[in-house]
Image (tube, helix red, strand yellow):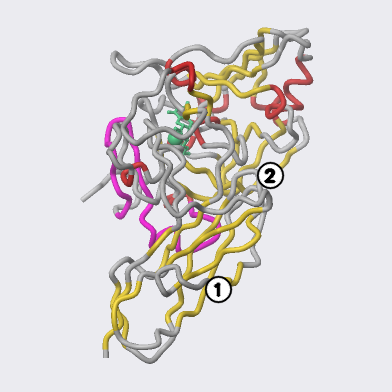
Amino acid sequence: MFQMPGFKQNMIVRSDGPIDLETPLSSLDKAWLTAIEDHYVRCHLPAPRVDDTAAKAWTLSIDGEVNRSLKLSMDEIRKNREVSQTVTLECSGNGRVYSNPTVPGLQWEKGAVSNAKWTGVALRDVLNAAGVKPTGKHVIFNGADEPMASIPDFVRSIPIEKAMHPDTLIAYKMNDVDIPLIHGKPLRLVVPGWEAAASCKWLVSLRLSPEEADGNFMRNAYRIPNRNVAPGSAVDPKDMIPYTALDVKSIFTAPRDDSTFKFGSPIELRGFAWAGEADITRVDISTDFGRTWAAAELGTDKARYAWRRFRYSFRPPKIGAYLPLSRATDSQGRVQPVLPNWNPAGYIYNVIDKVRINVEA
Ligand SMILES: Nc1nc2c(c(=O)[nH]1)N[C@H]1C(S)=C(S)[C@@H](COP(=O)(O)O)O[C@H]1N2
Ligand SMILES: [Mo]
């Protein structure tokens, strides 16, 4: 069993060094806002050592295509207007295990996704203090985690438009407490609605550049083909584009797969639906293998970049096996696909979800 101070034993360990933890669906099911100890964890490299003294002395440097290079203390950062966003972070590779043919990478099932409240300051305010030159088209960011022999430094970038969006944060709090070490203590980016690799943890530097970041995590990783490709095929790197905003998706969080129920009482099917920068407009459920669909009820908790709870009361017409399906639609008119669109890294797996249930006499 997984045992590490500060982590729940029921987390699913995808890697124990660097630490990658998937949240069990039963934990996600508990609340709209995921508790810190239930939030999934993804680290490409070992977390840096950041004790409270180091956190107090932390600095963030801003340089490159700016009028004034800055090195800001935590106090200087906190002088900006404080803002919060509740954001559903999802790892690009969430659902990768369902790729056929299989692809390399962490074999996440459904739980590399969580919803937390992040508080800090707008990245824009800090960039404006430095004064971005017209040539500053990308913000390249680095965290304090160090490269290892086999893994290069985790350096990525986002385009200036997303960096200047008032909802893009430099956060110092997660669910109203100081960000815990594994989630980026004491500072991280939160790039709402985008695949979570844009949300750099242990943030130490921002560099404005005319170009995207170089290096493995921008040039090779987090890229998808610019067209649909045949499963298993190799794709020329020049035909790969960065994966940015999340697609529309829903997952069942209850009941558990393969649950058995007694015939006669209704079964509550529930889960979450999210769509990155778009809003969830509906979630439809089918309990007859996709022949007919009916709208699920959407939860009242909502935030611009957060998932939406859905619930559906299912009354099985007779005993037997069922495979309820969930299909979300968003405000951009996107609908979850029936079948996966395979890609070499197994990103954006967002096929209509399903859960097996058995109804007995
Ligand atoms: N510095 C740094 N930031 C990082 C990472 C990392 O390895 N190093 N992993 C990224 C990836 S791939 C994901 S999915 C999210 C996970 O955030 P979490 O561990 O807080 O859930 O952090 C991102 N930020
Ligand atoms: Mo990720």
Name the residue located 40 percent from the left edge and 87 percent from the top edge: 317
- Is 298 rendered above or below residue 260? above
Instruction: Classify 139 as above or below 314.
Output: above
Q: State left or right for residue 32 relative to residue 74.
A: left
Which residue is at the far left?
A: 1
Measured along the vertical axis of the image, is residue 55 above or below residue 317? above
As rendered, which of 252 and 286 lies closer to the eye?
286
Q: Residue at x 36, y 41 (%)?
A: 96
Residue where numbered disc 2 is placed: 84
Q: Amino acid at mark 1?
A: Ala
Residue 361: image tag: none
Magenta residue check for 25: yes
Q: Is residue 107 left or right of residue 79?
A: left
Verify CB contact (< 8 Å) between mark 2 and mark 1. no
Mark carried by residue 294: 1
Frontmost of labels 2 and 1 is 1
Q: Position of residue 79 (x, y in %)?
A: 75, 30
Q: Position of residue 173 (x, y in %)?
A: 59, 41
Say few, some or many: other residues with alpha carbon within 10 Å of mark 2 (under 14 / 14 to 19 / 20 or more): some
x then y, percent, for residue 354: 39, 62
Which amino acid is tagged 2?
Ser
Ligand 1 is within 8 Å of the C-beta of the residue at disc 2: no
What residue is at 32 percent from the left and 82 percent from the top? 261
State the residue at coordinates (49%, 49%). 114
As drawn, 282 above or below 242 = below
In this view, the residue in front, 316 or 148, is 316
Q: Is residue 131 magenta?
A: no
Q: Quadrant of the C terminus?
A: bottom left
- Return the disc, 2 or 1, that comes first in the chain's sequence: 2
Give the residues drawn in magenta, as a range: 10-35
Secondary structure type for disc 2: strand
- Distance from label 2 to label 1 (Cα)? 35 Å
